[in-house]
Image: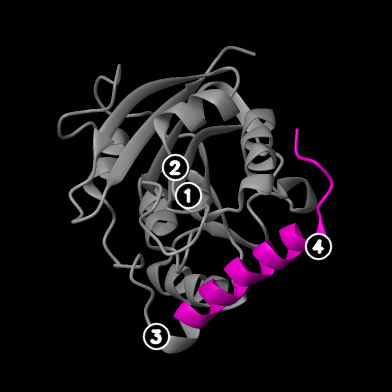
Amino acid sequence: MDMPNTGADVDQEEAVRRALEEYYRAGKPPWDTGVTPPELVALVEGRGQGHGERHGALPPGRALELGCGTGTNAIYLARHGWEVVAVDLIDRAIEQAREKADAAGAAVRLLHGDATRLDELDAPGPYDLFFDLSCYCGIPPHRRDAYAAGLTRRAAPGARLLMFGYGPGTLDDTFSGVTADELRARFAGWELVDVTPGTNPFPTFWFTLRAGAA
């Protein structure tokens, strides 16, 4: 379980928030390409090489996106029949996501908040799909167990988590990045069913996890 926050922990969280806010103030963040990743398309529509045990399209259900940015992927899911809730820490991102969803006529419930503090948000679940495009890998270590616990409490039996993350040491800090071993350790009751290297010029990975039965 996560321990009570120290002053250094709070400072680390604020540093992450400020860095993210600066990306949006400066313009388009590098992770916000406006294009839905083919890995998510493959999972939802059943195209491509697949992830682990998946066969065919994933039936639409309820989805929660963690770190949704300006809403590209939440809108994609809504257009494919999913009931979507999407969360982002940065209010400017949520504002842009609302504008995009309205323009697209997509029914997405967008929440401004912390993906590691889902109990403070109106996102009770259960969810059949979680999607995370480089959110978890930037979370300070003292909040990562809370992230995993929040998803686990909201996971329908057999729910999928599709996560994109970069490897440790990619960024110029002491904590960013994620490994398969870490996910296995933190996500108790989940199975890591697939790890696929990304195509970036630095180490990145697509992880697919499946929740166990209730």
* Residue at disc 1, secondary structure: helix
- Report the Cα–Cα distance between label 3 and label 4: 31 Å
Q: Between residues 43 and 15, which one lies in front from this camera angle?
A: 15
Residue 157 coordinates in the image, percent (x, y): 57, 18
Q: Are marks 2 and 4 in contact (CB under 8 Å)?
A: no
Q: Are marks 2 and 1 in contact (CB under 8 Å)?
A: yes
Of pointers 2 and 1, the one earlier in the residue sequence: 1
Q: Which residues are magenta?
A: 1-23
Amino acid at the residue labelled 4: Gly
Mark 3 crowdedness (10 Å alpha carbons): few <14, some 14-19, many ≥20: few
Residue 8 coordinates in the image, percent (x, y): 74, 61
* Residue at the spot of label 2: 178
Q: Residue at x 57, y 53 (%)?
A: 139
Say which quarter of the image contains residue 75: bottom left
- Report the Cα–Cα distance between label 2 and label 3: 26 Å
Q: Residue at x 23, y 45 (%)?
A: 198
Of pointers 3 and 4, the one earlier in the residue sequence: 4
Q: Is residue 3 left or right of residue 31?
A: right
Q: Would you place residue 43 above or below residue 158 in this image?
A: below
Mark 1 crowdedness (10 Å alpha carbons): few <14, some 14-19, many ≥20: many
Q: Is residue 198 magenta?
A: no
- Report the Cα–Cα distance between label 3 and label 1: 22 Å
Residue 193 coordinates in the image, percent (x, y): 36, 20
Q: Kindly report which numbered mark, 3 or 4, lies closer to the viewer in this rendering.
A: 4
Amino acid at the residue labelled 1: Cys
Question: How many numbered marks does the figure carry?
Answer: 4
Q: Is residue 55 left or right of residue 127?
A: left
* Residue at the spot of label 3: 27
The disc placed on residue 7 is 4
Of pointers 4 and 1, the one earlier in the residue sequence: 4
The disc placed on residue 137 is 1
Colouring used for the render? one colour
